[in-house]
Image (cartoon, grey):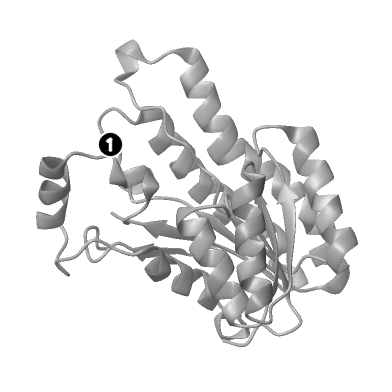
Amino acid sequence: MKLDGRVALVTGASQGIGHACALNLARHGAAVALAARNQQKLEELAEQLRAAGGKAAVIVMDVADEEQIKTGVKAAIVEFGKIDILVNNAGITRDQLVMRMKRADWDAVLNTNLTSAYLTIQQVIGSMLKQRWGRIINITSIFGQTGQVGQANYAASKAGLIGLTMAMAREVASRNITVNAVAPGFIETGMTAGLNEELKQTALKMIPLGRVGAPDDVANAVSFLASDEAAYITGHVLNVNGGMLMG
């Protein structure tokens, strides 16, 4: 899975799955534009990549802000000359039962998790069309496939990413651009670390492989879909869930 000469933009790169994706893509040879809100964490990751011989650029960007997306993507293209690989990973949760969910919490999750992906794709697609090569990888969730109590906003945003993936795959396939999604199950990240132990153990019983996933389990799937080895895969949702959902 050599990615030498490729340039990747990863949103939500400062922590969790995005952090692992950035490291993994760089390990396979890609230069990486690191996008997130936390500049300090991005700088630390960039130094780590450079120390290992990689190329990295820090893009401070709130994906809930359209103008920051436009400015951030332009900065990445100025830095590296192009974007070959886009990983739409940035995401938040604002959990609550629908009857109590505030409209602001619905809007925040949909804007950050779904609308930002559409806006970022709009900004990078020109670079991919020009070179007739591209990889767009959207990080969805098992809960976008199954739903989840108290997460109507999150589940809707992640299900929307699956629809966006398939529509985009059809739009750009003739230009040698693939668009796929990765659907993680229960992954050990900051987002899941706050869950109580009883809930974690209940989730663990639902995983046939008998363990919680690691961010690198997702990152390995992303690097594969970004590579030439995955050139004949598009419009696909790759489940990385330990067997929690099959079919």
Image location of residue 127, percent across then percent down? 84, 63
Total marks drawn? 1
Question: Looking at this view, is 2 or 41 the one in front?
Answer: 41
Q: Quick check: 68 above or below 180?
A: above
Say which residue appears at 58% left-offset and 48% top-offset. 164
Say which residue appears at 54% left-offset and 39% top-offset. 113
Question: Looking at this view, is 95 or 156 the one in front?
Answer: 95
Image location of residue 181, percent across then percent down? 50, 59
**22 lies left or right of 121:** left
**187 lies left or right of 123:** left
Residue where numbered disc 1 is placed = 148
Image location of residue 88, percent across then percent down? 59, 53
Say which residue appears at 37% left-offset and 52% top-offset. 189
Question: Looking at this view, is 38 or 84 the one in front?
Answer: 38
Q: Residues within 10 Å of mark 1 (few under 14, many from 20)?
A: some
Provide the secondary structure element on which disc 1 rests.
Answer: loop
